[in-house]
């Protein structure tokens, strides 16, 4: 997390003003510590093609380079990423190399004994944020330095102008170390951003890039700065377009900011490292201002901050494509009341009619149950002319609040 000058943008309340790997309120003399050793031009060109910001906070470091203030990357990783150029439109991004998990993987974390007990507790809280999501990655601590997958050191490298640095995965393994700046983090009263900074750096270690890498002025302020030539970054399905305030992977934050995972962060982690990554993307449920509900796999359809929708979280997982035993869920828009209708029977409405407009396939569910699947129930309220869907039978039972149970739409996987 990199330092830039701490300043405020009074008309842009949604922006964060420090590089997400960045310090608390600093005096102007402490800002923009320019590194005297420069990255070779041919490496700069490669990094810019990959969309990395190369500025005074980018410099040669050990066997590679520090870019965007806190990401360590080697030339070999750069070249591998350049082999996979591609258009990027979604909100969260990951690098080409990710952590291999199989059905699950335990990542052992060593915590420097030089940290204060208060700092150690903040680091444990950061690990707990990931573990609470029940991903296929589980983080645990170890006292063995040689046996650790990730080592979190207290480091005196203030010249980098960073809160902390980490790197990106390679060959299926997480990046091996996080360095925390001892100018800020070995105290009995750690800064308010401590948990978020550690969580952010772990995000890099498992493959996440900055959400606003194309223009870090979104969270850092100042003039736009990034190269629009894309590559080496891959969109995470279902996370929308553009940037979102408060995400744990924004490039900048203040020293007091605490950023727990927001919904789009959870979607990114679930869809990348979720317990059932091979069992579809998350299926979201929103309550409309009209009192009806909307269901989608695409977070961008209902952005945070839209006053017409209230997020009710992740309901279940739904496949984005067909396969053995899977049935498409057809989606229709009710032009009379503005709500949506979902069915696995195309003959119910076909290509639509004067009242319903066909919008395509929302996802795929199973027509039969199995040990680890759950039913997706369909309810209807004649008085409201609304349909309601849930995987939690206790919400409505056989019927409630004017709704009656119509059928089981199909079977899918719970989000756990």
Image (cartoon, rainbow, N blue to C red):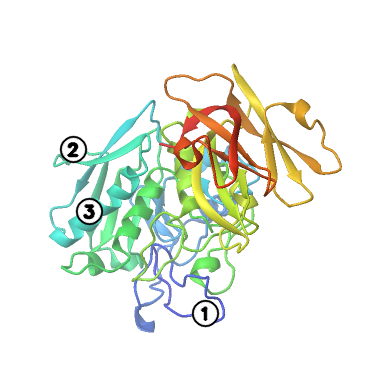
Asked whether, in this view, residue 198 is left or right of residue 38, the answer is left
Q: Which residue is mark 3?
A: 153
Which residue sits at x=22%, y=39%? 148
Q: Residue at x 47, y 19 (%)?
A: 370
Residue 27 in view, yes or no = yes
In-front residue for pair 111/412: 412
What element does badge 1 sit on? Answer: loop
Give me the C-alpha separation between circle 1 and circle 2.
45 Å
Q: Tell me, yes or no, if residue 96 can be seen here.
A: no
List the residue tagged with mark 2: 146
User: Label 3 neighbourhood size at 10 Å, few (<14), some (14-19), many (20+)?
Assistant: some
Crowding near the residue tagged with mark 1, few <14, some 14–19, many ≥20 C-alpha atoms within 10 Å: few
Viewer-nearest residue: 123 or 283: 283
Q: Give the answer, above or below, for where 311 lies relative to 101.
A: below
Mark 2 surroundings: few (<14), some (14-19) or many (≥20) residues within 10 A = few
Q: Tell me which numbered mark, 2 or 3, is placed earlier along the sequence.
A: 2
Quadrant of the frame with the N terminus? bottom left
Q: Quadrant of residue 37?
A: bottom left
| Image side of residue 63 versus residue 125, left or right | right
Residue 264 % position (x, y): 51, 51
Q: Mark 2 and 3 residues: CB-CB less than 8 Å, in contact? A: no
Assign a secondary structure to mark 3. strand
Tell whether label 2 touches label 1 (CB within 8 Å).
Answer: no
Residue 9 disc label: 1
Q: Judging from the image, what secondary structure is the residue with disc 2 in?
A: loop
Residue 303 location (% of width, % of height): 60, 56
Of tags 1 and 2, which is closer to the observer? 1
Dot placed on the residue nearer the N-terminal end, 1 or 2: 1
């Amino acid at each position: 997390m990199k330092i830039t000058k701490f300043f405020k943008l009074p008309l842009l309340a949604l922006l964060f003003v420090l590089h997400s790997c960045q310090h608390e309120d600093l005096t102007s003399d402490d800002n923009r510590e320019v590194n005297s050793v420069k990255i070779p031009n041919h490496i700069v060109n490669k990094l810019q093609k990959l969309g990395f910001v190369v500025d005074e906070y980018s410099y040669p470091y050990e066997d590679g380079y520090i870019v965007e203030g806190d990401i360590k990357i080697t030339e070999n990783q750069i070249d591998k990423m350049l082999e996979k150029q591609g258009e990027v439109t979604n909100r969260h991004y990951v690098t080409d190399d990710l952590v291999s998990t199989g059905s699950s993987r335990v990542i052992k974390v060593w915590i420097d004994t030089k940290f204060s007990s208060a700092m150690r507790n903040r680091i444990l809280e950061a690990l707990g944020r990931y573990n609470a999501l029940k991903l296929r990655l589980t983080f645990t601590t170890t006292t063995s330095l040689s046996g650790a997958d990730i080592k979190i050191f207290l480091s005196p490298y203030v010249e980098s102008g960073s809160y902390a640095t980490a790197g990106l995965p390679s060959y299926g393994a997480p990046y091996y170390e996080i360095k925390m700046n001892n100018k800020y983090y070995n105290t009995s009263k750690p800064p308010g951003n401590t948990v978020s900074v550690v969580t952010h750096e772990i995000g890099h270690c498992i493959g996440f890039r900055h959400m606003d890498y194309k223009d870090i002025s979104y969270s850092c302020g100042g003039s736009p700065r990034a190269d629009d030539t894309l590559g080496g970054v891959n969109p995470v399905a279902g996370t929308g377009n553009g940037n979102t305030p408060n995400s744990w992977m924004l490039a900048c934050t203040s020293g007091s900011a605490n950023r727990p995972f927001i919904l789009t962060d959870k979607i990114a982690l679930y869809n990348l490292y979720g317990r059932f990554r091979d069992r579809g993307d998350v299926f979201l449920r929103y309550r409309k201002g009209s009192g009806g509900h909307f269901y989608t796999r695409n977070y961008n359809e209902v952005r945070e901050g839209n006053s017409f929708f209230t997020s009710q979280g992740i309901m279940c997982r739904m496949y984005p494509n067909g396969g053995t035993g899977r049935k498409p869920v057809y989606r229709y828009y009710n032009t009379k009341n503005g709500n949506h209708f979902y069915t696995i029977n195309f003959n119910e409405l076909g290509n639509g009619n004067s009242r319903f407009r066909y919008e395509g396939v929302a996802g795929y569910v199973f027509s039969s149950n199995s040990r680890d699947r759950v039913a997706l129930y369909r309810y209807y309220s004649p008085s409201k002319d609304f349909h309601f869907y849930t995987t939690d039978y206790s919400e409505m039972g056989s019927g409630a609040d004017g709704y009656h149970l119509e059928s089981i739409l199909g079977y899918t996987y719970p989000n756990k």
